Image (cartoon, coloured by chain):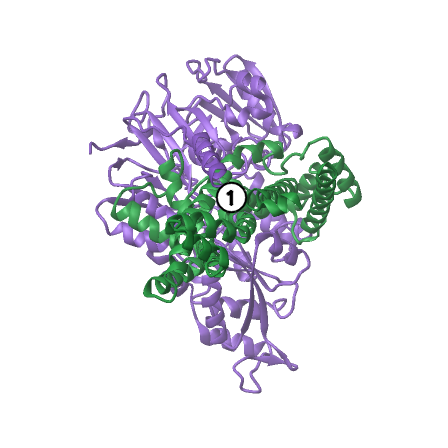
Chain colours: A green, B purple
Amino acid sequence: MLSFTLRRLLSTLVVLWAVVTLTFFAIRLLPGDPATVLVSQAGGSAQDIAAVRQQLGLNDPLAVQYVRFLGGLIQGNLGVSLVSRRPVADAIVEQLPHTLALATSATFLALLAGIPVGIVAATHRGSWIDQLCIALSVLGFSMPILMSGLLLMLLFSLLLGWLPATGQGSWRHLVMPALCLSLASSATIARLVRTQMLEVLPQGYITVARAKGVVERVILWRHALRNALIPVITVIGLQFGSLLGGTVVTESLFSRRGLGRLVVDAIFWNDYPLIQGVVILGAAIYIAVNFLVDVSYGLLDPRIRRG
Amino acid sequence: MNRFLIVFTLLSMLLVSCGGQPSESSLVYGLTLTPSGIDPHVDASSELGIPLTSVYDPLVWLTPEGEFVAGLAEEWEISDDGLTVTFHLRDDVTFHDGTPFNAAAVEFSLDRIADPATRSLKARGMLGPYDRTEIVDDYTVRVHFTEPYAPFLTSLSTVYLAMVSPDAVSQWGAEYQFHQVGTGPFMFDEYVPRDHLTLVRNPDYDWAPDFFDRQGPPELERVTFRFYPDVATRALALQSGEADVMGEVSPQDAVRLDQSPDYALTPVSIPGQPLQFFVNTQRPPLDDVRVRRALIYAVDRQAIVRTVFKEYSLPAYGPLTRPTFGYDPRVEGMYEYDPQRAAALLEEAGWIDADGDGIRQQDGVPLRLETILMGWGYIPEVGQMLQDQLRRVGMDMDSREMTFSNAVSDVADGRYHLAPFVFSSSDPDIIRTTFQSDNIDGGFNWSKFADPQLDAWLDEGRRAIDPEARRAIYGEIQHHLMEQAVILPIRDYVNLNVAGAHVRNLRYDRQGWFPWLYEVSLAEE
């Protein structure tokens, strides 16, 4: 087990290094010049732009910049934003809790809606209830956040006045963005749960349980669902990544703070260190979540734990 | 897994569920872009000036009518050679932190801007050929320049040349942007990047200029600025009551809200340059002035502005917008919409539609203009209409929508015929940025227009201390640029601000972006 964990840690480091290196070169090979973008705000001469480029250290050879960056990274230093001149780590730490709150609430909502809908659809296979669930999931999957967000705002903020349309501060601010962000994931989870349940339900041990007189509710939630959940957990891990991506749109629309907006601004400004920082963090979160997913397999299925 | 998620969610919610309590006379003001940084001496966005104009008093105010009146300086004299400006300062002003305002504070502020270590992106340019500040006595300073610099007083009237508390800057250093201290009617309370910025009333404020319709401390106790980056949400935030004032509302929303008695629309024209397409004068066929002129004649700007920007914007006819000092209305008659004339000019230049496909050719080469479009400011919509209008005179427009970064790189490689941009500025000197020949390589002279006569005028305009002489020089410059047809002007930039009807006395300064919140009061609801 220990050697497994060690090997896993090592491969994680290699993956992180590859992400860092790829990001480093990819964003610098893209067209654009941070100095020109900075000076474009106020106007200035060609000379001013050249001076800013020199100040930002962008005239140094790429290899020198790479070594400088990697050296800093090993010491846990993500560098300084070209634009705000503040440490990248500070900017990320400020925004991270907001994005995590949004993404985890959305994941939670997706499970809360997706699992029951999937089970109901599976147990009512072929009926109008099943059809309705499938229709809803298609809608949830295909509706862009921009549209569902505006519809939710119109309903809950303008017409009903129940929830604030924008900003943050309390859980009430979180409801709509999280709901909006969760729609696509709920749909995916619902469809997956339905398929898995349909596979599990006809199996022998379910029939045995029924024959023993186990209550239907227990059969569904304990015997069937538990076995149907393994692929669902994998998908949740993957979905978490796309949820982090979805926060880009959600945060802008609902005027929330967060990493999504940070990275949009960073890309607009060609703020290389900041883009790198967010990408490294995103990769780390993704790897961590999938590690948790691997661990949770064992909890759900003892065979995996022993193997 | 479920239990873990619940706990984590609750914890995260707790983490973010602090702050946000409305008080009696408080105002929420919606901003758009997130500024990269908000130190007025260092950073360059217009967004930072919206809150900070209320934190700092200028040495000299510029009234809405364009007059300079006493601010922190009671009087000033400009020397005959234009190289020094002497300011006599008020002796009864203190910064929010209790530091007295005096000659040393002026010297400190201007020197901070000029210091290369400050890495100023805007203020340094606005300070021009600044040499040093001489302290004559406690309340008299003499600012020295290495050559005459006409925009100086205008620059001083803006927040970028703010008078900052020397004590606060020394105390906070690089973190000063989070702890700003000025002498203005509001005090800087808190700035949380990407979320909000709060100002509170300065109870000791007692040095407002006469042109304001109140004296003493402001009526508002607290102003909170929030960021609304998505244009779709801005009107919604107003309508749901989350914001009292919103800048840069979309023209469609502005039309809608303007019809409601619950809202008041304040459109403000922004000085500087209009939304314009720079015409690459070094790339055929646009190296031929007849083709460039045909291009302008072929475009019905009135129709574009009315369709895309609604009734609040005026079409632009030259390189400066109407509220800019030195704007010359002569340019308005130079290119009336005239597609016949455009066609005649193209024919004269040898562009004829020989094969009848609707696009003119010359020596087998079709008349096609590669056009860069950027995804903001309704430029794609403008591009669509341009394409249609140009086609009617036999010009083909091939447009590519891209980010600003990509545009910069395409421009550097010369891969364009037309490229759009807007520079707003308090002074006509901004057109050095876009038309001085030094800025063709690696700068913003995207028309790639080199003209020694123009360069000389631009230098003269910057040095001309006498306003009338200066006005005449910029008149020549505008006329010349349009005669050479180096830009296709589209629209004077207008900032569409919408406020709830309960917000009273909201007006904006000459820069157009910056509200004078000092005067604002709220009606009883």
Residue situated in front as seen by the camera: B273 or A111: A111
Answer few, some or many: residues within 10 Å of disc 1's Cα (few below 14, many 20 plus, some between 14 and 19): many
Q: Residue furthest front?
A: A212
Judge whether residue B368 can be spotted in this image: yes
- Residue B272, above or below B207: below
Which residue is depicted at the point 59% across and 41% down?
A: A292
Question: Residue B360 location, x and y as percent?
Answer: 56, 79
The answer, for residue B322, to whether it is visible in the render is no
Q: Which residue is more in the foreground, B460 or A260?
A: A260
Which SS class for mark 1?
A: helix
From the viewer's perspective, is A304 left or right of A113? right
Q: Is residue B139 above or below residue B405?
A: above
Q: Amino acid at mark 1?
A: Arg
Residue B95 is left or right of residue B82, and the answer is left
Residue A196 appears at what percent x and percent y? 49, 58
Residue A262 place in picture, x, y as percent: 54, 41
Q: Quadrant of residue A43?
A: top right
Disc 1 target residue: A261
Q: In percent of the image, x 21 and y 46: which residue is there?
A: B261
**Residue shown at 39%/64% (left/top)?**
A125
Quarter location, residue A2:
top right
Q: Quadrant of residue B210?
A: top left
Residue located farthest toward the bottom when viewing the structure as drawn: B355
